[in-house]
Image (tube, helix red, strand yellow):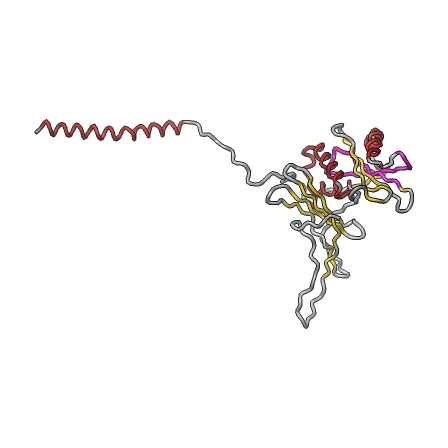
Amino acid sequence: MERSITLRIVLAVASIAAAGAPVAAQAQAGEDLSAAPLKMRQVPDAVPPVPFSPESETAERVAPVEYRSLDQMTEKDRDLAADAEASISEHAGHLDLEFNQGKWGYRQVVCPAFPNHLFLRFTRNNGTGYVSIFTASVPRGGEGRVRIVPIQMRGYSLFSPAPINALTISAFNHIRAEEHQDADQDWLGNGLCYAALAGGHPVAAKLTEDSDNRKFPAAIPAALAVPVNGGEVISFTDVSASPKLMQWNMIFNRKEKLLKATHAPVGLLTVGAVPPSTGALPTRSVPPTIGDLPGEH
């Protein structure tokens, strides 16, 4: 009997020891895991990449596009223009702009957003309505090449109008690429420079009231929008355009390429007094919004 009881006790102790072995092994494994280095994996940003940096200049601080006559240009810029004349003539000739015919003059278009390029607006006027215009882009540091943006030939638009022309968009994308990251610091400056290269004299709108007749420009302040699918949209109203203000929209993809540019005339917002007898609300026209881009003109 005693031998039987002793045997049972030995078996019970062995069973308990066997059950504790996995626990000890797990504890040992836990110590090893805690001592091992952790493997980190970078989580991609939730926000898609966009062309312009978050630190871009705000619309209130953007330097305007400037126009300089030949005598207002610096000596360095006049020399660069003279050195590029042969190349400008060659590229303008490929577009049948008749650069070697008649008398052409030019002004400098100063775009602060693109400091590494010299822009020249060439004009030839052989009579009323007989005007030819194009813009030339000349790289300052030797990186890149001369590019031509055709605007008018004898008073008519070349191909499609310059603001929506594929040639204008292509030249602009190449200029941005040659500027490298310098072009990403000023989103509104990009928009104003594009409009200038296409033949305009753009001035971005600030919403103000005409106190005499209670009319407001139907112009949204300059804005930078980021669509859900990435990229960016620059919108601004050119208040210098005549006879009507012009609304500009420029659509960029995630790879910093300008895909499309549109511009359309806008009118005025008229605010009338509410007749005291009816209580009706005044009516007004609705200006275009970023989400509802105007059609091409």
Residue 218, above or below 43: below
For residue 78, say whether it is visible.
no
Residue 155, above or below 15: below
For residue 264, say whether it is visible.
yes
Residue 189 shown in magenta? no
Q: x, y (%) of residue 265?
A: 75, 52
Q: x, y (%) of residue 34?
A: 39, 29
Residue visible at 20% across and 28% down in the picture: 14
Image-quadrant location for residue 279 = bottom right
Q: x, y (%) of residue 167?
A: 76, 38
Residue visible at 91% across and 44% down in the picture: 127
Q: What stretch is highlighted in magenta?
A: 100-124
Q: In this view, does 233 lie to the left or right of 108?
A: left
Residue 119 shown in magenta? yes
Q: x, y (%) of residue 202?
A: 77, 45
Camera-side residue: 111 or 218? Answer: 218
Image-quadrant location for residue 166 = top right
Camera-side residue: 204 or 86? Answer: 86
Residue 217, above or below 174: below
Camera-side residue: 115 or 93? Answer: 93
Q: In this view, does 59 lie to the left or right of 47?
A: right
Name the quadrant of the N terminus. Answer: top left
